[in-house]
Image (cartoon, rainbow, N blue to C red):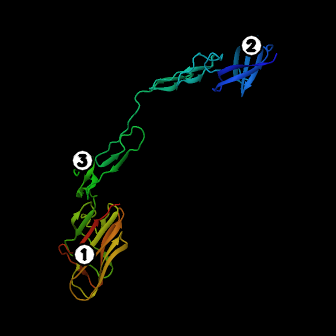
Amino acid sequence: MPLTPTHFPLATRLDAGLRIRSVAKITHGPTVSNARGKIGGAVFTRTRGGNVAKALSIAAEGVGPHNLLSTAHPDTAPATPPARGSLIVAQNVTPAWKELPLGAPTEVLTSDGTDAKWAAAAAGGVTSVGLALPAEFDVTGSPITDAGTLTGEWADQDANKILAGPISGAADTPAFRALDPTDLPILDGARVYNSADEEFASGGDNPLTFNSERYDTNALHSVAANTSRLTAKRAGVYAISAHILWASGAYAPRGLTLYLNGATPIAQEYDIIRDVGYAAQSVATLYHLDVNDYVEAFVHQNTGAALKVLASANKSPEFAMQQLTQD
């Protein structure tokens, strides 16, 4: 008997998730009970009884029928396909796979240490972050609800203002205001003089002494010791000056020198007095002094006889030191 073709509509799902709709053509005779064939990489088996085809099965080549989470595979359940958004998770029991349905919109995927599960998100999460600054700043980018940058910049201010606390000196929030004398650092200074004439032998340098003070802000001078020294109590730059008036004397040199720490001359006035009569001399300089550095005013005359430095109100002998900067 000649073989007659039999056509079977074929529709099944493979393990790889590929749905094939095709027609398998099997040629057989009445004496053939079963037939096998392939469509691409899929293997099909036809079972017949007599001349009637009873069943047709199909699977990936070399693998039995398998459909994840269906009754077609002995390790999976349930029989219905998984819902949209579900997760397929493994479990160390039979069936080997199970469906984890989609969680609620407010839930997050977590774990109980054994299996994955959906759980409510922790309460109290931050949803917005803002930046608040004093009025002296402009703030941009606030608030941030997703991603961004918070920025604070100085706001424009009027000219000739400083950022400082209150003028009263009390502790309080700083603000921009005009500069006040109390904002300036404390600077030391002293001006001293001698109320009596001082006489000096001819030749050599001799220090002037001072028995009175016009002012002394920080004990730079000692009246009790009638000392010749002005001593720095704070490091910084100082303006230093001395002024004297010589009594009438012979034609000869006269000098006024500022000495640092009794040894180093830092300024000098030296004249040859050509006319008999009074002679005034002044000397001044700017100099950096460290703490406990001291300065003195030394005089020199070479007339061949003793000569006085005269006491003259506000003019002689006067010696001053004023701090200008502070280290």
Circles 1, 3 touching at the beta carbon (< 8 Å): no
Give the quadrant of the N terminus: top right
Picture mark count: 3
Answer left or right for 15 relative to 274: right
Q: Position of residue 126 (x, y in %)?
A: 40, 33
Q: Residue furthest front?
A: 2
Q: Position of residue 287 (x, y in %)?
A: 34, 69
Circles 3, 2 touching at the beta carbon (< 8 Å): no
- Residue occupying the point 25% across, 61% down: 217
Nearer to us: label 3 or label 2? 2
Distance of label 1 from label 3 (alpha carbons): 43 Å
Residue where numbered disc 3 is placed: 170
Between 183 and 38, the residue placed more toward the observer is 38
Answer left or right for 6 relative to 240: right
Distance of label 1 from label 2 (alpha carbons): 138 Å
Residue where numbered disc 1 is placed: 243
Q: Position of residue 130 (x, y in %)?
A: 35, 40
Q: Position of residue 258 (x, y in %)?
A: 32, 73
